[in-house]
Amino acid sequence: MTDYCNTPSLPSLEQALEQILDDLPKPNGYQRLGLKKALQRIVYQDIHAAIDLPSFRNSAMDGYAFQHHSDQDLALIVIGCSWAGKPYRGEVLAGECIRVFTGAYVPDSCDCVVMQENTRRTNESIRLTHWPKRFENIRSIGSDIQQGQRLLAQGHRLKAADIGLLAACGIADIAVFNPITVGFFSTGDELISIGSQPELGQIYDSNRYTIHALLEEAGIKPLDMGVIADTPEAVEAALLSATKHCDLIITSGGVSVGEADFMSDVLAKIGQIKLWKMAIKPGKPLLFASINNSVFFGLPGNPVSVMVTFQQIVLPALHKMMGLTTDQPALTLPAIAAEDIDKQPGRLEFQRGVARKTGDELSVSLTGGQASHMLSSMSQANCLIILPRENTGVKKGQSVNIQLLDKHL
Ligand code: AMP
Ligand code: MG
């Protein structure tokens, strides 16, 4: 276990993440799924195309196909029609043309297509108002995908376009890594379920809902194990039971150093603590361990800490366990601070912000209070403002790095 007692010696996020990722078990096995079931799953092995795409020459436009060297002064005689799905199989000579529609077969004897808008038709012939270039508007065989080409690499997460690509190549099912089982529970005697009336000192358990949503966003169907009482015995029993069917266990609460924070004691007893605490804010007390064959993440209880540690640490770990190898570090963008931002040196800080496009630049303002219990700050935010460990605050007008939380500003 790496034990860091005082803040200067706490590992950075990068160090912690590297250590955690190195320590994770490999994804186990695969299953074959029909395309409609495979969205968001991770490709088990490289997939190659068995056919060319397009597999026949076809038209990119509704128009007319003909021989490019036909006499430009004469009208082209329309001798037939090639429909999408109903090809024209005859030969087209110089001075002749055929009507073609988008996606329709273009015979080898034609080497260009003029778009309909550039023609004037009179009965059985056309005149062109604009002569196309040779090969214009013809989609050649294999211009999208060539037979034998790698379509998707192992470790790639299937998105809608990939599913379509596989279908276009006639592939009906695909080997994907087995899903991982993730169980989670909350700890805290103050927590009550939605529907009950809180008494003084009680709060609704929001973390379980947040974690459930975060896992679903990650493409995982999680196992909600409820709220576990704040006793070492109850937590130990819940963890041991979870190890029977979970590859990964996530808890919230009880990882700090208060009297009711005994996750580390329990983990030291029944598992192996690999890392505890890192120099980030919020989320410093994150606990990473293993119990039997399960991976364990103990997230702090504060709702914002839950979200930040999940996004920065748990998500990359989940991805690796799921077999995803094309994971990139979260994209950061520069933005101009629209207000002063306070910060103490010592920890990498994630403050919640609202980024806006101002002309060609992004500007960012805080969502208000930044305390780690303020889930509203996370709900209003569309980005996290990343303030490096030794940063001592930012003045209005200075540039900061942000990570977008929403695709749309
Ligand atoms: P802890 O890490 O257990 O000391 O909890 C830190 C703070 O987070 C306390 O104010 C808790 O009441 C709060 N908290 C812990 N668990 C949850 C939860 N599941 N939902 C909402 N707040 C929580
Ligand atoms: Mg607690």
Image (cartoon, rainbow, N blue to C red):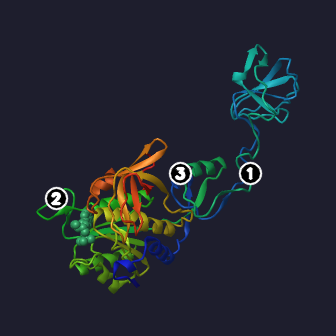
User: Where in the figure is residue 243, as x and y percent of width and height?
Assistant: 38, 76
Kindly indicate the quadrant of the structure image that contains residue 264: bottom left
For the residues bearing labels 1 and 2, Cβ distance under 8 angstroms: no
Q: Which residue is mark 1?
A: 146
User: Is residue 246 visible to us here?
Assistant: no
CA gap between label 2 and label 3 equals 40 Å
Other-residue count near label 2 (Cα within 10 Å), few / some / many at <14 / 14–19 / ≥20: few
Ligand 1 sits in which quadrant?
Answer: bottom left
Circle 2 SS class: loop
What amino acid type is highlighted by mark number 3?
Lys
Q: Residues within 10 Å of mark 1 (few under 14, many from 20)?
A: some
Image point 37% across, 82% down: which residue?
4
Q: Residue at x 74, y 53 (%)?
A: 147
Which mark, by number, is residue 196? Answer: 2
Residue at far left of view:
200
Secondary element type, mark 1: loop
Q: Amino acid at mark 2?
A: Ser
The circle on residue 36 is: 3
